[in-house]
């Protein structure tokens, strides 16, 4: 019975891991990069100076919105800090007659970025790190709801794969420190196990809490059974001050910086986000939210103020037990609270998770290659998995590297520039897919890995010439961010080049038959770990 | 306190690694007895417990446990790489020299 159970778990582990493994790889890569979302937002706008005085930026945002959209339905301002490129502002125009609500926020013509001097930023148009954040659960070029279902199902499979993997690889804890190198399949297995078990707490946490972020979509029944009115649920989860009606009597808006200072004094922690309803009207209302960087739970408390007198009128009630639990889980998933040390540890654990998924996918082919009846002509399923592996594991990072280059090289005045940066990622990835289809994996693996390494390695060199004020110079004035991103790129470049060289140099054992496909990649985990 | 917690997790996993037959034998040339193994493991668990205390003392009850878990992973990963890649290579060189 015991053996039967373990065998069934091995079957479950193999197939739950394989079927959505490619989606998981994309989710892991972009999620790992997205831990540097704010940092990349700034890195990818290299013309902008670091924010030194957030309150001056806020005053600038208020000035800008007062001129640009004085009679808007609402404004929202995400407050600037040293990590962010500036304050992102949105405004929603008054709804037209017959429209239930104003236009959806987030349109490009109703938003702006306010830079460190409090002026509208003149920076290249880019999605920056936000792209990775959105892609992590919304993917791209497809309706958001489908993408979330797909990512949700992939996460469920991930949870199944982790739990069945613990049963299948029963010796992972006893062989905790074992890495047999240059041993083909055993090395792959040890590498897969090492990346899995060393960061197992992270993998379990990130998968489970990832499902929690999607829980209302995946399992709506608890919500349906308890709340007939969706607005009431939203009010329970995200309490907000009662809505205000425009009176038509103009009144000047209070200085927003004084309200933020007051809220920060009450919390003893920084504010992160600010919303103004009916600015310029006697009924104006300002809501300030605490910065998610200052607390674990994603359910940040809020204060509302009268927009004319600046008198506090409302404070969000402390969330209930269930809401607080969900908030803490989402908070621990997103890691917005994490200081630089903890953020690096999140990032490293994410890299380990990415390697775990990648090595698991490759292991599927490594294990089956030995048993192929005719290794020169593997069956269709084998070739499909092998080539999908090359396309996704080597091709997608190449696309990401090309995105970073597009961010530097596309003309600043180009129309739809931000979207084109992303198109470049998918064009490069598509080219990689075509290459993987028409050429042997033994060639395409090192070609793609090597190209990715070269692109990542040359980017810091380009930055050095194109933006002399960034990078090393900024390090001199105590701003480690641009140089830190460049150094990380160099480290990954070295890793990719090393793996590519390893694949090129690898000679299959003498008894090997011809055309062994991706067999040369066998020793990669050990090398990647190095 | 954070640095202390990190040192403790590193030391703890060093002890765990030293309690394995393979690495103990490679590093000392002897096989560890079962009593010795138990002692190394006990020391390791003690180190992890102290690291938890240090993490809580440094960062409080909300971030402290998260930081501890993250440092445990970092300690395990660092010792894993050290034992398998660096100490091993040095060992081989010595033998060939």
Image: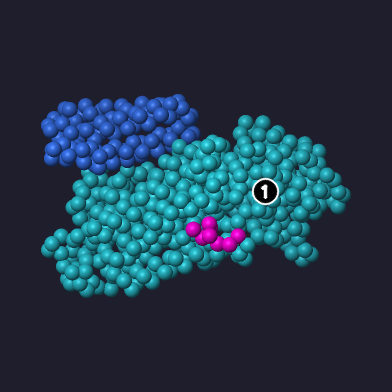
Chain colours: A cyan, B blue
- Which residue appears at 81% of the width and 41% of the height? A308
Query: Is residue A410 one of those drawn in magenta?
Result: yes
Relative height, residue B38 to residue A127 (above, below): above
Q: Quadrant of the C terminus of chain B?
A: top left
Relative depth, front residue between A134 and A170: A134
Examine the rendering and report whether any part of residue A469 can be seen.
yes
At 68% from the left edge and 43% from the top edge, which residue is drawn?
A117
Q: At which x and y percent is residue A412?
A: 60, 60
Residue B45 falls left or right of residue A29: left
Identify the residue position indicated by label 1 in the image: A114
Residue A271 occupies which quadrant of the picture? top right
Disc 1 secondary structure class: strand
The range drawn in magenta is: A405-412
The chain holding disc 1 is: A
Q: Name the spot of residue A203 as percent of width and height, x first.
A: 38, 47
In the image, is residue A462 above or below residue B35? below
Report whether residue A304 is seen.
no
User: Which class describes the residues within 10 Å of circle 1: few (<14), some (14-19), or many (20+)?
Assistant: many
Where does the image place residue A239, in percent across and percent down from the top left? 65, 45
Nearer to the camera, A362 or A523: A523
Q: Nearer the viewer, residue A278 or A474?
A: A474
The residue closer to the viewer here, A424 or A344, is A424
What x and y, as percent, mark residue A216?
A: 53, 55
The quarter in which the N terminus of chain B is drawn is top left
Main SS category, magenta section: helix
Residue at the extreme right: A249
Asked if residue A149 lies left or right of residue A416, the reply is: left
Q: Indicate yes or no whether the magenta region holds residue A451.
A: no
* Number of numbered tags placed on the structure image: 1
């Amino acid at each position: 019975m015991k053996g039967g159970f373990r065998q069934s778990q091995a079957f479950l582990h193999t197939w739950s891991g394989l079927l959505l493994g490619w989606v998981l790889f994309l989710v892991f890569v972009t999620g790992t990069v997205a831990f540097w979302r704010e940092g990349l937002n700034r890195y990818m706008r290299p013309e902008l100076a670091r924010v030194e005085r957030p309150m001056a930026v806020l005053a600038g945002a208020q000035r800008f919105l007062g001129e640009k959209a004085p009679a808007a339905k609402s404004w929202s301002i995400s407050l600037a800090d040293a990590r962010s490129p500036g304050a992102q502002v949105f405004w929603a125009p008054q709804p037209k007659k017959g429209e239930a609500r104003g236009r959806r926020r987030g349109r490009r013509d109703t938003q702006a970025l306010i830079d460190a001097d409090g002026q509208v930023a003149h920076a290249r148009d880019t999605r920056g790190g936000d792209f990775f954040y959105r892609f992590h659960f919304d993917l791209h070029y497809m309706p958001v709801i489908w993408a979330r279902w797909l990512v949700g199902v992939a996460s469920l499979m991930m949870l199944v794969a982790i739990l069945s993997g613990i049963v299948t690889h029963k010796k992972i804890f006893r062989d905790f420190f074992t890495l047999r190198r240059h041993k083909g399949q055993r090395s792959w297995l040890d590498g897969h196990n090492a990346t899995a078990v060393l960061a197992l707490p992270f993998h379990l946490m990130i998968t489970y809490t990832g499902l929690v972020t999607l829980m209302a979509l995946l399992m709506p029944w608890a919500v349906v059974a308890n709340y007939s009115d969706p607005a009431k649920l939203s009010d329970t989860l995200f309490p907000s001050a009662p809505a205000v009606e425009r009176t038509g009597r103009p009144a000047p808006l209070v200085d927003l910086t004084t309200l933020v200072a007051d809220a920060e004094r009450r919390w003893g922690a920084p504010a992160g986000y600010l919303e103004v309803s009916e600015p310029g009207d006697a009924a104006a209302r300002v809501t300030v939210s605490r910065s998610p960087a200052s607390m674990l739970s994603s359910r940040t408390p809020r204060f509302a103020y009268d927009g004319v007198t600046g008198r506090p009128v409302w404070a969000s009630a402390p969330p209930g037990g269930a809401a607080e639990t969900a908030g803490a889980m989402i908070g621990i998933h997103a890691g917005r609270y994490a200081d630089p040390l903890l953020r690096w540890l999140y990032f490293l654990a994410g890299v380990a998770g990415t390697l775990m998924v990648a090595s698991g996918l490759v292991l599927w082919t490594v294990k089956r290659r030995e048993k192929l009846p005719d290794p020169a002509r593997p069956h269709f399923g084998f070739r499909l998995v092998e080539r999908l592996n090359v396309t996704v594991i080597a091709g997608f990072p190449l696309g990401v590297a090309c995105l970073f280059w597009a961010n530097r090289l596309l003309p600043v005045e180009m129309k739809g520039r931000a979207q084109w940066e992303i198109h470049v990622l998918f064009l490069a990835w598509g080219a990689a897919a075509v290459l993987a289809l028409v050429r042997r994996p033994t060639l395409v693996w090192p070609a793609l890995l090597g190209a990715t390494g070269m692109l990542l390695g040359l980017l810091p060199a380009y930055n050095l010439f194109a933006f002399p004020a960034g990078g090393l110079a900024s390090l001199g004035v105590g701003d480690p961010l641009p140089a830190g991103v460049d150094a990380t790129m160099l480290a990954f470049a070295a890793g990719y080049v090393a793996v590519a060289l390893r694949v090129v140099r690898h000679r299959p054992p003498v008894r090997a038959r011809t055309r062994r496909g991706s067999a040369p990649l066998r020793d990669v985990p050990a090398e990647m770990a190095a | 306190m954070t640095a202390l917690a990190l040192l403790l997790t590193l030391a703890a996993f060093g002890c765990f690694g030293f309690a394995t037959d393979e690495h103990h034998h490679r590093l000392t040339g002897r096989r560890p007895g079962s009593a010795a193994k138990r002692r190394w493991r006990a020391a390791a668990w003690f180190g992890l417990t102290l690291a938890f205390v240090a993490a809580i003392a440094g960062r409080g009850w909300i971030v402290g446990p998260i930081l501890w878990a993250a440092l445990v992973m970092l300690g395990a990963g660092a010792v894993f790489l050290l034992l398998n890649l660096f100490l091993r290579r040095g060992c081989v060189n010595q033998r060939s020299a």
